[in-house]
Structure formats: C-alpha cells, structure tokens
Amino acid sequence: MLTPDVVTSVLAEFAVHLATEAEPAGLLPARQQMALSLGWHIILACFGVAFPAMIFAMHLRGIRRNDPVALGLAQRWAKVSAVLFAIGAVSGTVLSFEMGVLWPGLMGTYGDVLGLPFAFEGLAFFLEAIFLGIYLYGWGRMPPKRHVMMVLPMAITGIIGAYCVLAVNAWMNVPTGFKLVDPSTGSGQVEITDVEPWAVLFNQHAFLQFAHMWVGAYMLAGFSIAGVYAVGMLRGRRDAHHRLGFMLPFVFASIAAVTQPFVGHVLGFGLDERQPAKLAAFELAETTESPSPLRLGGVLIDGEVKGAIDIPYLGSLIAMNSPDKPVPGLDTIPEDEHPPVNMTHLAFQTMVGIGTLLAGAVVLFWVQRRRGKDLLQKRWFLRFAAAAGPLAVIALESGWIATEVGRQPWVVYGVMRTTEAAGDYSASLWWLLGITTVVYSLMTWGAVVVLRSMARRWREGAIDLPSPYAPEVRQ
Amino acid sequence: MSIEVAVAAALFVGIIAYAVLGGADFGSGFYDLTAGGSRRGAELRTLVDHSIGPVWEANHVWLIYVLVIWWTAFPESFAAAMTTLVLPLLFALLGIVLRGASFAFRKFSETLGQARLFGIIFAASSIITPFFFGTIAGGIASGRVPLDGTGDRWSSWINPTSLFGGVIAVGTCAFLAGTFLVAEAARSGQTRLADELRIRALGVGVVTGAVVFAALVPIDHDAPTLAAGLEGRAAPLVVLAALASVATLVLLWRRRYAIARLTAVVAVASVVSGWGVGQYPWLLVDEVTIVDAAGAQATLQALLVAVAVAVVVVVPPLVYLFRLTQSEEWTQH
C-alpha cells in the first residue's frame, strides 16, 4: 500500500522528529547509525545462528550415507559461512563500540544492569569463533567423525548468544532487576540500586523474544540458502547437488515458517499492558474501539486513519484474544509518549504479511508433495522460492523496526528516554554515518563479489580454490 | 584483593591476551604489507594466511571481552572513555572492520587484482589499528579522560604519551608476529623464508626496543602518575620486559625460534602488565580509582562467575585450537 499519501506522511513524521527542539542534535544520526549497523549485522547474525545447524545436518548426512554430494555441499557451505562469519564478527564489534560511543547515557547509567547477558554472549561467541576455526581448517585434517562434531558447539553457542542478546532487548522493553531511588528524570542524578543481574539475564520476557528471533533466523537463512539453488534450477541445473542444496535448508525454513505465527502470537500476549503505545501503533488504533477491527495498511494523518481496510472484530480477536475486548487506542497515551505510529504500523504489517505468505507457501509445497506433485518442476514456484530469502530478510528487518521504533521515545521502556541515552556529539555524527554507509556498502560489495566468484569457480569444477597471492601459483 | 580489583584484574587479563594473541595477528600485517610484489611476496603471504587464518577470529574476541567487562563492571568510566576518546576508537574500529572483511575476502578472491586490493587493505589496517589502540591506552594512562567524558576530543590522544603508545603498540605487534612467523616458516621447512624473516624481525625488535626506552623520557613529564608507577611498583615488570626482549633478540640471532616465541610473549605481556600495574589503583588515571568506578556489587559477583565459566569452557577448546594449528597435520598445507 505504498501510495504517495503514505510516503508523504511517513516523511512528515520523520521531519517532525528532526525538528523537535528537545532532541539533541546528535540523536537522529545516532539512531540512523544504529539502525544501519544493527540492521546489517542482524542478517549475518541469522546466518551465524542457523547456518551451523544446516551444515551439521548436511555433513552428517554425507558421513552417514557416504554421500559425496552432501559432503561437497557441507564443505562449500563451510567456506561460505567463513566469509559471512568474518564480516559478522566485525559488524558485531562495531555494535559493541557503538553501545558506548552512541549511547553513553544508557551505558554509563545502566551498564552494570544490562551487562551480564552481554558477558555470556561474548563467551558464547568466543566458543563459536574457536570451533569455527577448528571446523573450517579441519577438513581433511581430522578424523571425519570427530570433525563433524566440531560444528555442533557452533550451533549451540549460536543459540545461547542469540538468547543473551535478546535478553538485553527484552529488558529494554520490560525493564527489571533494579530499583530507582529518584525516578524523577531530568537534571537530578538518578540513583540505581538493588541491581539483580541474573534477573535481567533470565527475565521472563526474554525467552519469547528469543524464540521469535531464533525461528526468524532459521527462516531467513533457510530461505536464502534454498533460494540460491532455486536460481540454479531455474537456469536448468537440475542435478542431485541442486536438489539437496535446496531441500535441506528448505526443510529447516519450512518448520520455522509454520511455527513463527504461533510464536509471534504468543509473544504478543499482554502487550496491551506491557507497552500499550506500541500495540496501538501496531494496530493503528487511534481511538479505543470495542470491538477493534484489524486494520490492513493505512496511515495516520493528522490524527485520522486513512486508506486502511478494516476487518471487524479481528483486531480484538488477534491482539486481545477476545471477541470484543478493545485494543487501547493512542488517545489513552500522552502525546509525548507516542512512537512514530506509521512507521511502526507499516513495519509490523509488513512482517506479518510476509510471514503469513511464507507460511502459506511452504504448506502448499508440502501438501502438494504429499499428493505426489513436485512444485520444484514449476517455474513460478522456483521464482517464488528465489524471492523467499529476500522476503524473509525484509520480514525480519520489519519486525525489528516495529519493535524498536514502537518502543520510542523510550530506550529503556518507561525509565529512560532515547534523548537521555544519546551523546552530545551533535552534527559530527552525520559524518560518521556517511563514512559508515560507504564502508558497509563496500563490505557488502566485497562479500557479493567474493561469494559469486566462489560459486562460479565451484560450478567450473574447482574444489580447492587456488592461492590468490601470486600469478604462478594460480592456474 | 577486593572484588572490584578482582574484576579489574580479569579485565586486564583480557587486555594482555588481546595484546599477545591479537597483537601477533595484527603484526603479521606489517610483514604482509612489506613482503614485496605479488610474485616475490607470495610465499610469505601464504604463510601469513596459513598461520592466522584458523585463529584470528578467536583472538579478536578478546577485544569484545574487554569491552563487555568494562561497560558492565565500570559503566561510568566506560561511557567517559568512549566519549572522550571517540575519534581514535572509531579509527581503530574502522581498521578492524576493513581488516577482518578484507582478510576473509582475500582468501577467496577470484583474480590476483582482487586479492592484491584486499591484501593491501588487510595489511594496512592491521598496522593502523594497534596504533590507535596504543593512543587510547596513552590517553587513559596520562590522565586525559575525565570521568564526565568531556575531555578534549583531539589532545586526549594526540599527545606524547599517546603517540609513543601508538608506535610502541605497532612495534610490539610486529615484533611478536615476526617471531611467530619465523618459527612457523622454520617448522614447515621454508628455510629461505625463515632466514629472511629473521633479519626483519631482529630489525623490528631493535627499533621497537629503542622506542620503548626513548618513550620513558617524555612519559616522565607527560604522564607523571604512570611514570611514578613504572619506576616504582611496576619496575620489576619493566626490567623483566627488557630482559625478555633482549633474550628474544639473542634467541632469534641464534635461530632458536621455538623458545624465542616464549620470550617474545613474556616481553609483550610484561610491557602491557607494566602499564596496568603502573597506573594502579587508577582506572582512569588521576580521575577515578578502580574501586570508585565499579558498578553494582551483585553485577561484579556475577561477572566473576561468568569469568570462571569462561575459564572452564573457553580455555580447553582454545588450547585445542592452538595445539591443532601447531600440529603436523595442520602444518602440511
């Protein structure tokens, strides 16, 4: 529903944020910087979380069935994951710098509250990096049965690491594990006491947020990898290599895709009490209506909903689990605590829409398969499968935009505003954002060039890539 | 030892580990950059790739470990250092990003031209990054980071202590890497390469040693608190560093490469520890002590639990990885 109307109103919302006087000059670039680097890193993090399990399954199949096709795929995937892991590691390092550089107010005040999960995340990442080294360089140098087991710690530590990061994010949404002595924010120093770091690590909201992200990671990585082989099949490469390369990640992605709507739904329980403003923005509920409709598309312009398709009752049913309980509207929330409504709403609906589409598509595929029809013979399905990876990326990013933008103006919900978290670098952060954009673009370009050239050489039959360091070594 | 000091010690162990293990990785960039044309330098570049390929990502995590412990245990001082030293931090970060990405890209490059481009980026950023980390250490050690984070964004890292810190960091990384690469070359039977590297490592060692001693004079004026510590409490470490460095040079000269690696590690570890012990009990020199900078007690306790868990679960596989990279099967490329 990207009508010009929508675009102007979203832009207008943005402009309002720019112009608000109370905001430090560095806030907007700091936000964009965080959004760029986090949004970029999340994609690689998904591969870090989900790819090892797929490599493990593929490698195990290769060993168990003595299947050279599976072994070949596992070996190639390991090399691809080496490239992705390397740039994921550096973009993750960027984030840990940015925590301090961009948000000194948050880290200086709450560093000891939110820090422990990061310590365990670092630990998990450490193990992942160690075993990646062992696994990657172990090909042909270790007994096969021991070698395949070296992937397993990576799959497990990916899960633990994701949980820890999500625990911090869940804490930002539902802060716990500390007390404020003087909660009156402003110039007076806020005293934080009774810090319970373990309560933050195991906060009740963390598990569900983690589950949603974890499943999302399998969707993103699974559909993306399967999509590569779908493209190959579209180009007429219909060998065992492509079939297996498609099928295994597609199985992972399928399970994730049909699970995700349930996980997401459960995660949403109680959002009306936790963060009513976010829910109102998700549902585009300007006023409290009973029963609330489900609003498809639409934007809020001058306090009025425009261009939405309303489905009666469904809003109450989905968001509140009741036929008539109303979704609390934005009118119940003070004006200065409204998140950017349109961005949140559209991002949320994009996520749900794509998620539903992908879930439907995999159900269709497997039902048809049971009936003896192979959709992989259909070009339209292969085209869809090729698009599913990018679609999953968009869904995941939208989900993050929805939950992060929907939490604004708070960085720690109800306790610290994002304005208080930002540093006072003012306009120089625009420079930083510009440089970051250039560097990340170059890094993306480099990754694409290198991965494509790897694929091309593999297609041409090269198994070991030649040494790139001198003309005479390469042939 | 109070719990605050225990956590600070755990943090500092991370800094030493990063300086030694990460430092050896960074330093290899120096030899890579100066290896000569693509034909002449191929052997050395392959050696660099081979020796740091399996371990650089694990070695890099020490930096994340340090940052996380710092912001969790001493949050206010972390925010202060991050805001005052934002420029060298960002330059170091840029180096890390370019280095990590281009190292991975080079390995899988398609053409020699691509490999050369990525290789130059990798090698150059390997040299730049430790320089900026050195300036950051110098800024903190010379008392230029106020606790409210309002220190000057330029003079906090462009000053005698910082600049010497940067040069020393680059030199020690290169020296470490030199001894490791020599040993690796000798072990895999590349005698000609080992001899060539030996001369260069010796040169780097002599120059770096000279810079370290030359630095003591300006540091005396520019960072009196640190200087007093170096001449007092940390004096044994300074002496140990000097002895280990000389021993490394002698061992390299006599082609005793395996032992030279050990003395080189001792030298670098004692230089870095000398800085830590020298500025004790300050966390940010002349601004805030370790005890005063600490966050919630419960968090410090939890962090020590995390560190203990790390020792149990991370150290064995890390040792396994290092042992594999030094083993016969992994040496034959």
Image (spheres, coloured by chain):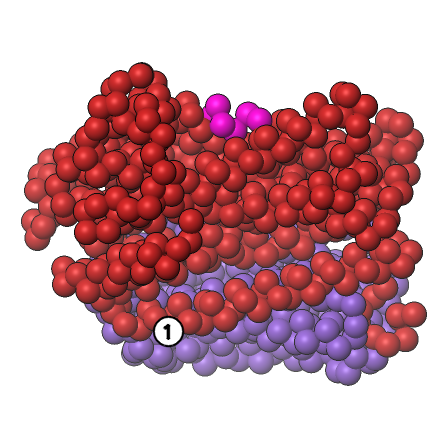
Instruction: Tell me the residue at 33%/26% (across/down).
Output: A312
Q: Residues within 10 Å of mark 1 (few under 14, many from 20)?
A: few
> Chain B's colour?
purple
Q: Position of residue B59 (x, y in %)?
A: 59, 53
Q: Is residue B317 above or below residue B89?
A: above
Looking at the rendered structure, the secondary structure element under dot 1 is helix
**Residue A221 magenta:** no
Tell me which segment is drawn in magenta.
A258-263
Write down the residue under mark 1.
Answer: A431
Q: Position of residue A46 (x, y in %)?
A: 56, 43
Relative depth, front residue between A352 and A66: A352
Judging by colour alone, the chain drawn in red in this rendered image is A
**Residue A260 magenta:** yes
Q: Is residue B103 visible?
A: no
**Numbered-mark total:** 1
Task: Quarter of the image for the C terminus of chain B: give it.
Answer: bottom right
